[in-house]
Structures are given as structure tokens and as C-alpha cells.
Amino acid sequence: MIDELRSDGELVSAMAAVRSAAGDLEALARVAWSVVAEPGDGVAGALVQALGASEALRVALDDGVGPVPGRGRAELAEGRARWRVRAEVRAVAAAVRAAGDVQARLLIPGDPEWPHAVDDLGAHAPMVLWVRGDASLLSAAPRVAIVGARAASGYGEMLAGDFAGELAASGAVIVSGGAYGIDGAAHRAALGVEGRTIAFLAGGVDRAYPQGHRQLLQRIVATGAVVSEVPCGTAPTKWRFLARNRLIAALADATVVVEAGWRSGSLNTAGHAAALGRPLGAVPGPVTSAASAGCHRLLREYDARCVTTSEEIRELWGISGYVEGSAQEGPGVDPERRRLRDALGVRTPSTVTELARRSGLAPTRVSALLGLLELEGDARRADGGWLSGHSDRR
């Protein structure tokens, strides 16, 4: 595949629209990796770390090469099976052209604007970052993540806005996920004081998600940065939101959860921050409020710092140390099974190959999981393909 990428004159020319070094083979290979591998794929990351992106791409599609350092042969074989489903030069070219259409910029490790903070993710670090707006903000300091519930209360949105506005006015870069609720309140407040803010998306930077935040994201592009590790055209999915959260936590000098339910996705971000040794703060709410149960859980179980003012949030930047524990979903939750459930349609049946391409799993793994999902009522056979077992997926 790497030789096809190099010889594709139109692709090389299209790279010029997203990157000054249009003939950079490493950049081309990393774009290809962002197409064939799902965000945070540790086997792909280990391969790239060991061999470099272009050579790793050769190895990924070559049965004759041995295991990756630190990874077994079975892991590499499983990785090859899922990568090959997506290994198409035209998909790489489409991603680059789509990025050029929205004036997105491609960043790879080694670029001046590349945020070294995300390198702390190791084998799970992003292959590339697509940026619309001011890429220099990714390395500007200080950076504070303000995250929380989508279905936020007036109390939560008020505090998120107050904190973000005060911090942005004093020079901090506000980092969040562009979602409804706490995220949106934080972004709007930063923009309202003519401050700087970064929105990390779970889909491509060419897709406004949620649609209701289209104008907000356009405003962020104008004065801040909208960022994603997945190619343009990629749809946001549940597992990509969870993968996106690790980037928010890694980039920020501190993470503050303003309001979150007991199993909120914001706790996933908090878990990544804790695992990375980043300072973690949580805002308390009424003890009777289910909307703040997740924040109270962080304070009680994960050693988060109680923060109630912007000044207390600033104090987090001087706190360091690894925090034991994780706020990820409970034991027994199979992330691959969740990805496959999300990939199943409710109206149009999909083949195993289509589901493999959509979920980023190997076809053999898809086939095995479909049997389990069918037994659980989460998948059903229909017209030679597969559908979700639920007519109304949430």
C-alpha cells in the first residue's frame, strides 16, 4: 500500500493543501494508519513506534514478518485482519481531499505545533491530528479541560460558564469536547471573553456534531481550534467518543468535571487524566442531585480535588502525582462488543465485511461477536445480513 500511496500523483498533490511537506512519506503513511486503524489501537501504535509509520504499514500488510516488540504473534495477526478491511488507497486520498476542502491542517509528531502532551499516551497516542483553526493553541499554556454532562442542569452550565470565562480571560486555553451541556457552556464562555478554546471531536473535523453546535464550532474555528484524530468524513460513534476523551485528558494540564451522572462519559475523561497523572478536579453539587453523583464519586473514590472557584482550579496546575484507580465503565463491559452493537443498523442489513469496516474489528472477530449478540438479543439476522436487535437504539 505504501508504494501505491507514494506513486499516486493526485494524492501527493492533495497533501500540499493540508501540509507544507507534500512529499513527506511519513505523513502519508500516518494518514493511511488513521484510515485503517481505529483511534487508540495499541497494536498499531506499538508497530509504528518500533518501525516508523511507513515501514509499519508494510509490515501490517505482510504475512511474512514476525511479531512486534512487546506484542505477540496473535495480536499482530488480529491487527492485520482488521486493518486490511480498510486498506484502500482511495480511502486515504478521499480523507486528504476532504480535509483540503475545509482547510484542515495535518499535524504529525515532530511538527512544531504537535502537542507533546499527547505523546504520554504511548502506544495509544494519535497517529495524526487534523486541525481547523489555530494549531499553535495545542501547545499554548496553560490548558484546562472543562467537561461534564450533556444533559446539564442550570447550576452546572452556570458554573462551567463562570469558570471557563474567568480562566480564559486570564489567558488559559479551555479544552472540551464540543458537546451539548457543560462542554458547550465552557466553549461559549471562553469565546464570550475573547479567550481561546479547543474542541476535540469524535468524528471528522468536516462534520459538525452535534448539528445544533454548527455555528459554535464555526466560531471556534475562527478564533480557536477544532481538532480530531480521525479522518474527515468519519462519523462519530460511542467508542470514538470514549477514545476522544483520552486526548482531552492528555492535552490538558488539568481536568475539571463540573457536573456528571454516576456513569457519565465525563468520568471516562477523568479516568484517563488520573491514569496519566494529570491533576483532576471535581465540582460538588447538591447531595440529592443525580446530575452530580459522578462528581461526588470522583471526590470519594478517585481522589479528585474539590474545586469551587476558578482560583482553586488554577491551583490544580501545581498538583502532580499518579492517582490510583479508573473511572471507566464497570467490569464485564466488552468494548469490542459495544463497537459492534453501535455499527449495526436498525433498517438496512449489513454483511460481516461491512460491519468489520465500520467497527474497525477483524471479520473473524465480528463473526464471533455476532453470535453472542444474537443470543443476547442485540443482533438479528435479516436478508443475508445483520441488523440491531433493538428498533430504537440510544
Image (cartoon, grey):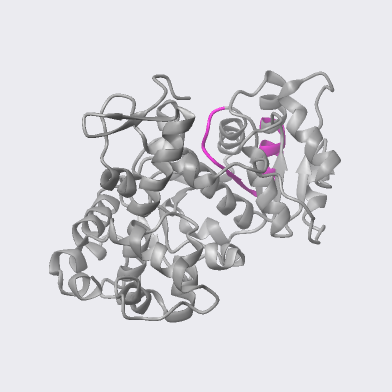
What segment is highlighted magenta in the picture?
161-180
Q: Is residue 390 visible?
A: yes
Horizontal arrangement in the rendering, residue 231 relative to residue 319 (left or right): left
Q: Is residue 113 visible?
A: no
Residue 57 or residue 66, whichever sits in front: 66
Q: Is residue 232 magenta?
A: no
Q: Is residue 172 magenta?
A: yes
Report the residue at 25% width, 73% height from top: 2
**Location of residue 357 in the rendering, given as x and y in whole percent from the top left corner:** 31, 49
Image height of 284 relative to 172, above or below: above
**Location of residue 264 in the rendering, given as x and y in whole percent from the top left corner:** 64, 33
**Location of residue 6 in the rendering, given as x and y in whole percent from the top left corner:** 21, 74
Q: Quadrant of residue 166?
A: top right
Report the residue at 40% width, 26% height from top: 389
**Location of residue 107 in the rendering, given as x and y in whole percent from the top left corner:** 42, 64
Report the residue at 58% width, 52% height from top: 246
Residue 174 or residue 4, whichever sits in front: 4
Image height of 92 relative to 340, above or below: below
Horizontal arrangement in the rendering, residue 313 relative to residue 73 (left or right): right
